[in-house]
Structure formats: C-alpha cells, structure tokens
Image: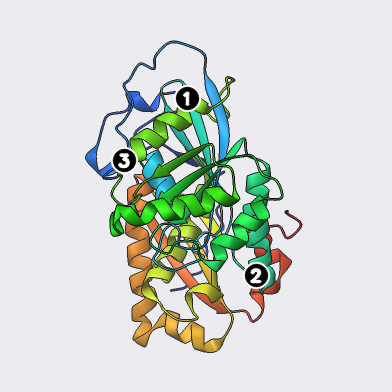
Amino acid sequence: MTENRADTPEEPVPVARRPGTQAGQHPGQAEAREAEQLPGSPPEQPPEAPPGPTRAGIVAVLGAPNAGKSTLVNRLTGAKVTIVSPKPQTTRFRVRAVLMHGRSQVVLTDTPGIFRPKRRLDRAMVAAAWTGAQDADMALLVVDARAGLTEAVQAIVDRLRRGSPTLWLVLNKTDLLDTKRLLPLTAALNEQLTFAETFMVSAETGDGLERLTAKLAETMPEGPWLFPEDELSDLNERMLAAEIVREQILRQTHEEVPHHATVETESWQERRDGSVRVDCTIYVGRASQKAILIGDGGARIKEIGRRAREELTRLLERRVHLFLNVKERPGWDEERARLRAIGLHEEEG
C-alpha cells in the first residue's frame, strides 16, 4: 500500500518505555496488567525497592542462531523488546534491554546469532555480536540444549577461548529433552571454557529464570543505573516499527524471502488525536521476492500490515496508521547505507 506522504514535520521519536509508566516512575508503581506481563516471566517487583546501593552492569547475550537469545531477553524483562521468530538470524543488530530487579539494573545486550558470514550484512551482524561482548561486564553463552555442541557453538567457544569477559553458561530449551542429557553437554562445554555459573532454563516456559534473574541482579557491580528506570530498551520507536514489520515478514514468508528483506521507517508523523502515522519501506533483492511479499491481489502485504499494526498498537498503547511500500533493490545487503539504516556498522568488531 502506498500513499503520498503529508508534508507535516516529524516529531522526535522516543525510546520505548515500560507500558503504563511515566518518565521517572518506578516500573513497580505502574498499574499491573496481565497482557503486559509475559507468561513465565519473573514476577514483577514490589513498588518500593529495598534499601541499599544501586547496582548496574551490561550483560551480553551470545549464542548461535536459534539458541533462543531473544526469547530469553524478552522473558527476563517481562516485555517484548526484541522480535522473535522460528527462523534463524532473526536478530540483526544489538538491542539493549533493561531488566530491573530490586536496586539492580541489568542491561541485557541481545546480539545477532554468530555464524559463518557470507554477505556484508552477515559480516556486520557477526561483528555486532562480538562488539556487544567486548562492551559488556559479563556474558551469557546461550546454548540450545536440544541441539547440543554443534559446529556453530564450537566456533563460538573457540573464539571465546581467546579472551572474554566473565562467562555464564545458559542451557536453554531444557523442557524439550531428558535432563540426563544435560550433564554430558555441561561437562563438554566446561572442559573448554571456564564458566562462573551454569543455568538450565526454558525461555519459552520461564523455568529456571527466577534464579538466573536473582543471580544477575546480585552480581552487578555497585554504581548508578545506566538507563532511566522506566525505559525498556535503547530501541527507538522508528526502529521498533521497522522490526515489527520485519517480524511479520519472517513469520509469513518462507525460503529466501525473510533473509533477503529489510525494513526502514521512512516517515513518522504524530497526529493531533494522539495517533501516529508510520510509513515503512520494505526492500528486497529480486522481483520474484517482491511478488511473493505482495501476494495475489496484495493479500500478503495487507496481512503483514494488519498484524504489524495490531502489534504496534498494543506496544505503543495508541492507534497506529501503518502504510507499507515494497521496493526491489538488488544488492541492498551489500550497501553500507542500508546497513547503517538498520543499525549496523561494518567496522564493528
């Protein structure tokens, strides 16, 4: 769907805040709403944080594609701060999500899955992951326990052996296999790397996350918080809109299309009635991919827009007018400008 864009000036787009909170308000003071709390998430904190010094630190979340890193980050924070899909390489750039627990602020850096890169896009994604580790106080190595010590995991382990911050091992998806299989995997990984802690969790169900949350909170160094306490992440709303659209592309298309499409928010216009108009452009590499995205009579792009609009309305807590345009742009995944537009810089790492 395309429309001529109004010439009204665009307003600054703030970073995402915790639903129901105002600037300067402790997240525990917001009115509790079941829809805002992900099932299985650690329980919300009481309105009054316990006395004592504040703590804050940055924790990089590393792992191979499809290890469940983004699901884990969303579950720990209790809100959707990064998109998820069953397809690998869903996360393309670093997103910092804020977990508040008592007097501790844990800044979780969700990173792209680490794999063997082929395109400039791939190289920038992998570089973003390793830069996230370098900038952190500590790192979680998230391993899909069902898949085990794969070639991709071994490559990450080999790189971490050259030097890394304090490492914790998080075996994810433990609800999908017999616990007897976890001990040999834990032993094999600990033979190669020194892990200060090991956790067996299920990001999908929430099992084991209360202990992980508590340990993260108590391990953070004393110091001032790094983000205002009502902020969910460093992802501004323009980037959030583009990512929500891309999430629907990942969920509704298959084969080559999801990994050869990118989304940019071209226009963000605040309206007097409190709603917002958002115009996004989807770039694909070939005409055949464009045809698949649009679908018969525009059915596919309309459904992508409908579901993305519903999700944005829920996340932003206001009416969203979303307009999508699909453009063919061969080689976009080799263009530095396109990579910068989605928050990637090839010089990282």
Identify the residue under disc 2.
Answer: 117
In which quadrant is the N terminus drawn? bottom left
Q: What's the distance in space between the residues labelled 2 and 1, CA to CA? A: 36 Å
Look at the image and tell me whether residue 319 can be seen.
no
What number is the disc on residue 218? 1
Q: Position of residue 121 (x, y in %)?
A: 65, 68
What number is the disc on residue 52? none
The kind of residue tagged 1 is Glu
Q: Specify the farthest residue to the left.
A: 34
Front residue of this view, candidates 193 and 245: 193
Front residue of this view, candidates 313 and 347: 347
> Which residue is at a point 66% across and 44% down the rendered structure image?
164
Q: What's the distance in space between the residues labelled 1 and 3, CA to CA? A: 18 Å
- Label 1 vs 3, first from the N-terminus: 3
Identify the residue under disc 3.
Answer: 41
Density class for disc 1 (Cα within 10 Å; few <14, some 14-19, many ≥20) is: some
Density class for disc 2 (Cα within 10 Å; few <14, some 14-19, many ≥20) is: few
The kind of residue tagged 3 is Ser
Q: Position of residue 230 (x, y in %)?
A: 45, 30
The kind of residue tagged 2 is Pro
Compared across the picture, whether 92 is left or right of 208 comes to right
Residue 338 to residue 48: above or below: below
Q: Secondary structure at mark 3?
A: loop
Q: Position of residue 240 (x, y in %)?
A: 48, 53
Density class for disc 3 (Cα within 10 Å; few <14, some 14-19, many ≥20) is: many
Give the quadrant of residue 327. Answer: bottom right
Please tell me whether mark 2 or mark 1 is closer to you in this view: 1
